[in-house]
Structure formats: C-alpha cells, structure tokens
Image (tube, rainbow, N blue to C red):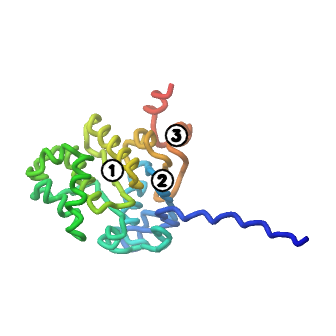
Amino acid sequence: MSETSPTPPAKQPEPLLIADNLTAGYIPGVNILNDCSLELAEGELVGIIGPNGAGKSTLVKAMFGLVNVRDGQVRHRGEEITNLKANKLVSRGIGYVPQNNNVFSALTVTENLEMGTFLNPPLYKERVGIIGDMFPRLMERADQRAGSLSGGERQMLAMGRALMMDPSVLLLDEPSAGLSPALQDEVFIRCHQINKAGVSIVMVEQNASRCLQICDRGYVLDQGSNAYTGTGKELLTDPKVIELYLGTLVKDHQD
C-alpha cells in the first residue's frame, strides 16, 4: 500500500497592507523611521501610539507616499506600492486624512465631497448618500463653506471626503487632535463605525488610551522604531507601556 504525502498547510493570505522595515525621513541623511514595521489585516483597526516625535505621523505619510522611503517596502494586497504617488494610491483604494489642512476651507461641504471623487466623478452620486447616512450633520451643512465649520465637523468632512472613493484602507493622522473631549469621543465612535462597515483603518492617535480601547491591535513607536506591539487590550494593561507611554491616568483609571 502506497503512502500518501501529508497535505501541506494552506498558505495564509498576506495582510491587506504591510510596511516592512521602513527607513524614511524628510531631509536627506536624516532618518525619522528606522526599520519600522506594521501590518494591517482585512477588517482590522490598528492604532499607532507613542511619545511626541516618535515617528507616528511619518509612518502613515511614508505608507501614503508623502515621505520618501529609503529602505524597506510598502505592500498592498501583495503588490509593492513603495513611494507611489498619492493619486495612484487613492485609485488602488487607499484613503488618507491628514491632521492639518484637511478640508478645502473656501469650498462648501458638497464641493469638498465632490473633490473626494475627483479621480472618478460618476462615483459621487453613488457614494454621497452613503456618506450622508454616516455623517448626517454634514448634509445639514451641505451649502456651508468648510472653513466655517467647527473643528469636529471639519474632521468629519475630511473623513467623509476620503471615504467618497470607497477605499478598503483608511489612514488617519491624529483624528482627535485639537478637539474637545466630547468631540474626541464622537470621532472615535465614527472611526469604530467606519471600521465595522468594512473599511480597514490605521489610526495615529495622541489619545493613546482611547485609541487602544477601540483598536484590534496597536503599535507603540519610540524614536522611529517599534517598541511594543499587541492587541489593544494587551497594550492598555501592559505595566511597561502604562509606565512609559500612557502615564498615570490609565493606571489610576484601572485601579
């Protein structure tokens, strides 16, 4: 009787988005990121936290082609996208919301959303109703100039515009920065809802504890490198992470 060879284990699919050992910076010869890595699986919400100057925003900018990657790779659905132009990445289904100057202040809410489908204008009619359901307050201010919106409303508009192209990945840079605690909480609720609607998210956040509460996994960066990684719950309760990065506020809350 002939022996049958064992069936090899099924090959696991590659994560949706990978930053693999990135070295990157703004000025020639000066690196902000040093062998920094991140993985985002389909359907995940991944948080990036760390002290000021750790390279958090630089990491998402490097993944979106806004900072030159000198070494390492960025891959999306298994294909290399390192240093691709932003318009190419948007057409591939990757959206990005910067921390500052993230709306067209002189344009109305509607015009900002139209700009979101600049690469595919016919998509506007299909997507505007979906975004309106997600952010009903924006529809109430459809004819209002974006520059006159509140900080929270501008953040919602920036996220809504990025979602107009129906991306599979959304990169968010400090979405709660500069907002009141109540508006910060609304932003986190919206991010959670967007993720549950099927958009995979990478979120850089200054509000580390709130970010870790809603994310599936988190990365702690320090001096441009990975310091810790784990599930949001693991990082939120890790004594070293609390001591070094989250401060006494989280510890007091847990006690």
User: Which one is nearer the viewer's eye here, 56 or 232?
Assistant: 232
Which residue corresponds to mark 3?
233
In primary-sequence order, the first of circles 2 and 1 is 1
User: Which one is nearer the viewer's eye here, 46 or 53?
Assistant: 46
Q: Amino acid at mark 1?
A: Glu
Q: Quadrant of residue 112?
A: bottom left
Q: Between label 3 and label 1, give the one nearer the viewer.
A: 3
* Percent of width and height locating residue 187: 30, 43
Q: Identify which residue is drawn at 36% across, 57% down.
A: 170
Q: Is residue 113 left or right of residue 13?
A: left
* Percent of width and height locating residue 66: 33, 68
Which residue corresponds to mark 2?
222
* Percent of width and height locating residue 72: 50, 71
The circle drawn on residue 174 is 1
Whether 244 is drawn above or below 120: the answer is above
In primary-sequence order, the first of circles 3 and 2 is 2
Dots 3, 2 in contact, CB < 8 A:
no
Q: Tag 2, which secondary structure?
A: strand
Q: Is residue 118 left or right of residue 141?
A: right
